[in-house]
Image (spheres, helix red, strand yellow):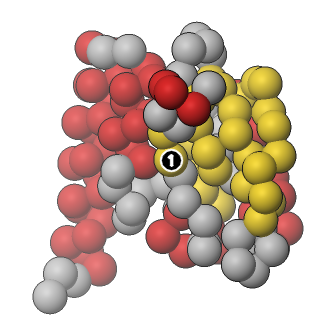
Amino acid sequence: MITGRQKKILRLLIREELMLLKEAINPEVAIALIGLIPTLATLSDRRLKHDILPMGKSPTGINIYEFSFEPAGQRYRGVMAQEILDTHPNAVVINDDGFYAVRYSEIDADFDIVPLEEF
């Protein structure tokens, strides 16, 4: 069993690795990698998204959207952190740049990459 302290150290190490990846590769790939790590928070701030389309709701009524980040090209499905802040405040964190991120492991919605053939 991993202790709380070990989890914190692991998160810090992963965060540093992801920051290096973000500098080395396309930001969209870095965002996708973050989404694959459920213990970390995924950028979900409405201010970072564009071409936002409502797609439905989760089983508990959380709004699900399809959107793009800059630069455009890839589409994603997920939530808006500002909405989650109202209903699940413990699932939302603020990153070092002042943007909201969501811990998807704490809500009943997923962060997904939309396959190219769907858009």
Q: What kind of element bears circle 1?
A: strand
> Is residue 33 toward the left or the right of residue 89 in the image?
left
Residue occupying the point 39% across, 44% down: 34
Q: Is residue 36 visible?
A: yes
Q: Position of residue 109 (x, y in %)?
A: 60, 65
| Category of crowding for the residue at label 1, using alpha-carbon neighbours closer than 10 angstroms: few (below 14), some (14–19), many (at least 20) | some
Give percent across and percent down for residue 14: 25, 47
User: Is residue 96 among what the camera can see?
Assistant: no
Name the residue rendered at 27%, 14% in the picture.
Answer: 24
> Residue at left 57%, top 32%?
118
Residue 49 vs 44, above or below: the answer is above
Quadrant of the image containing the C terminus: top right
**52 horizontally vs 26: left or right:** right
Residue 58 rendering spot, x and y as whole percentages? 70, 70
Q: Residue 84, relative to residue 49: is it above or below? A: below
Q: Amino acid at mark 1?
A: Asp
Q: Foreground: 23 or 64?
A: 64
Q: Is residue 29 above or below residue 23?
A: below
Residue drawn at (22%, 59%) of the image: 10
110 to the left or right of 5? right
Front position in the image: 25 or 60: 60
**Nearer-the-camera pick, 68 or 100:** 68
Q: Which residue is mark 1?
A: 112
Can you give x and y, in whole percent of width and height, for residue 8 in the image?
30, 65
Horizontal side of residue 23 vs 42, given as left or right: left
